[in-house]
Image: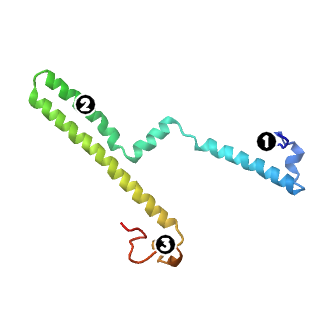
Amino acid sequence: MSRETDLDNLQKDDMTSSPTTWRELRDWDRMEEDEIRRFEAMRERKTASQIAWDKFSKNPIPYILAPCVGYCIFAGLNALQTGHAYMAIKYLEYRIWTQGTAIASLFIGGVYYQRKERRDLFKLQPYGPYRKQYGKSHIGYTSDKRYGFNW
């Protein structure tokens, strides 16, 4: 490595003086950019508990209903082994309902966040349906399509 690419290796007088040539400016800019990228990478790291909390806060229903499904299965099997056929059927029926509700919440949450992302994307666009159709001629937007989509 012939070039210095680490900010730590710069001398004190190098830090106070400005670059005199384009090469020095390019090298200094590259070092500074590398340092910024490392800092951004450090900030983006998340712990496992932060990732779990983010997932739970987006859609808590499946995480709440998963233990309920497990309870219904084990309670139904216990009722079946002890000879309570009616209660076993009821517990297994509750399991079906809770499991169906959890799966439905996954689909509903997916549709909600997909539509939210699309709506936010439209709001950020300088031209488009939320900007009173200004500049629509260059993006292929026609009035017979709803927000530029066929569905």
- Location of residue 136 in the rendering, given as x and y in whole percent from the top left corner: 50, 77
Amino acid type, label 1:
Asp
Amino acid type, label 2:
Tyr
Q: Nearer the viewer, residue 1 or 94?
A: 1
Secondary structure of the residue carrying numbered label 3: loop
Residue marked by disc 3: 128
Residue marked by disc 2: 71
Residue marked by disc 1: 6
Q: Residue at x 81, y 50 (%)?
A: 28
Please tell me whether residue 129 is drawn above or below residue 33 in the rendered image: below
Please tell me whether residue 111 is drawn above or below residue 78 in the rendered image: below
User: How far separated are the C-alphas under marks 1 and 3?
Assistant: 45 Å
Q: Nearer the viewer, residue 62 or 144?
A: 144
> Split into 4 quadrants, where in the image is the N terminus?
top right
Secondary structure of the residue carrying numbered label 1: loop
User: How far separated are the C-alphas under marks 2 and 3?
Assistant: 50 Å
First in sequence, mark 2 or 1: give its number. Answer: 1
User: For residue 62, what is the image quadrant?
Assistant: top left
User: Could you tell whether 69 is left or right of 31 in the image?
Assistant: left
- Location of residue 83 in the rendering, given as x and y in whole percent from the top left corner: 10, 22
Amino acid type, label 3:
Gly
Numbered-mark total: 3
